[in-house]
């Protein structure tokens, strides 16, 4: 049977076949998550893609509901990444593309040389220890090459950023180009899971944080509130951080703090495992670097954004033309491209 006739099988029949196999085995490993142009992605592939990250989430998130939500988001993202991969590989096949075996040989030999000191036997032993055959490894490396080649084609012919694009980015992101921004601020920290209180829930802690913020914006002294309610190392000092440089702060904290006007209080924000309220006492903006000095840096960033947008359009067109079942997964994938890959 040639390639064309094999792919002319009705997608409905293929779906029925794959899902009947899943039911017959009755194991999650064989559950078909989605079928793309007649090729299934099964749950074991999704599980393998998220295994290490899933273990980390289980170790760091205590709330069962939050854990379930994060695990669901992680698995969904992994599924959509696998769909993206299969769409690109299918496109390569439709184009009649081939990768010379010599290229794969050279790539594998490079891996052996750089990671196993040229010891092929040690490399094969490592593959066996991880339950992988040389054939499967070669296939994975070939797939990586294909994906890299086709993705590169989408951005290779993009025009350079225009002066207007560069200037717009400079205006909208001026905080990135200031030297030594400083801020004097205080915080109130309410942990989601307070030590010594096993009955507290994130919902109750968030409600407490909102009530404290309401007191702060209504005129209560922020320092007194911090001494009374805050649960961090700065509570005894009224939550005072003193004068801090932007670069020394946690990125999430800095992004919220530097948007505040002097004398204002932030909304309750979630940072790591805490709910935080931030009071800005004063800000000292640094000197803005001249546009010409940072133009090359901005051009690289803008070109990267243009490349991502071009890839998004291409992936969307592949998904629109492909047979992706169930339809709900196709819709979710298209939404994910926009949301996760701006």
Image: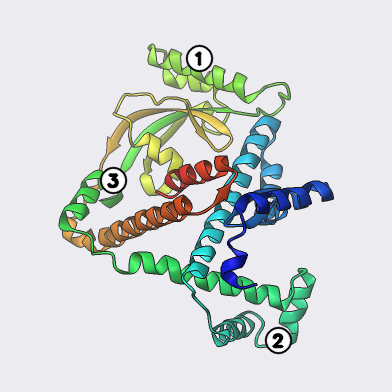
- Per the image, the residue denoted by label 2 is 120
Q: Are marks 3 and 2 in contact (CB under 8 Å)?
A: no
Mark in the foreground, 3 or 2: 2
Q: Give the structural element (helix, strand or loop) at label 1.
A: helix
Question: On the rendered structure, is 323 left or right of 117?
Answer: left
Mark toward the start of the polypeptide (3 vs 2):
2
* Residue positioned 16% across, 53% down in the render: 164
* Residue positioned 30% across, 32% down in the render: 282
Q: Picture coordinates of residue 34 (x, y %)?
A: 63, 49
Mark toward the start of the polypeptide (1 vs 2):
2
* Residue positioned 52% across, 69% down in the render: 93
Question: On the rendered structure, is 63 left or right of 141?
Answer: right
- Per the image, the residue denoted by label 1 is 211
Question: On the rendered structure, is 39 left or right of 131?
Answer: left
Please tell me how crowded label 2 is: few (under 14), some (14-19), or many (20+) other residues with Cα within 10 Å. some
Q: Picture coordinates of residue 158 (x, y %)?
A: 28, 64
Q: Picture coordinates of residue 276 (x, y %)?
A: 49, 29
């Amino acid at each position: 049977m040639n390639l064309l006739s094999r792919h002319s099988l009705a997608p409905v029949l293929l779906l029925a076949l794959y899902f009947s196999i899943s039911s017959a085995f009755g194991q999650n490993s064989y559950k078909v998550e989605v079928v793309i142009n007649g090729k299934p992605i099964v749950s074991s592939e999704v599980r393998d893609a998220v295994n290490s990250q899933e273990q980390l989430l289980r170790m760091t998130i205590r709330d069962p509901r939050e854990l379930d939500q994060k695990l669901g988001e992680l698995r969904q993202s992994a599924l959509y990444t696998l769909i993206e991969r299969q769409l690109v590989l299918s496109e390569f096949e439709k184009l009649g593309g081939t990768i010379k075996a010599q290229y794969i040989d050279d790539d594998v030999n490079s891996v052996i040389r750089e990671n196993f000191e040229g010891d092929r036997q040690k490399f094969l032993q490592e593959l066996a220890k991880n339950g992988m055959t040389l054939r499967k490894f070669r296939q994975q490396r070939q797939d990586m090459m294909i994906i890299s080649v086709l993705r590169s084609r989408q951005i290779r012919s993009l025009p350079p950023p225009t002066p207007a694009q560069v200037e717009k980015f400079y205006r909208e992101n001026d905080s990135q180009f200031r030297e030594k921004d400083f801020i004097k601020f205080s915080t109130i920290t309410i942990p989601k899971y307070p030590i010594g209180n096993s009955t507290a829930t994130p919902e109750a802690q968030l409600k407490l944080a909102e009530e404290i913020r309401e007191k702060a914006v209504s005129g209560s002294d922020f320092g007194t509130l911090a001494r009374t309610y805050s649960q961090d190392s700065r509570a005894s000092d009224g939550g005072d951080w003193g004068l801090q440089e932007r670069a020394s702060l946690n990125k999430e904290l800095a992004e919220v703090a530097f948007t505040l006007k002097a004398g204002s209080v932030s909304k309750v924000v979630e940072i790591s495992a805490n709910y935080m309220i931030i009071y800005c006492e004063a800000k000292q903006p640094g000197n803005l670097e001249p546009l010409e000095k940072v133009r090359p840096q901005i051009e690289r960033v803008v070109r990267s954004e243009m490349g991502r947008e071009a890839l998004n359009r291409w992936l969307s067109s592949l998904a629109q033309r492909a047979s992706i079942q169930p339809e709900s997964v196709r819709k979710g994938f298209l939404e994910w491209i926009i949301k996760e890959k701006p």
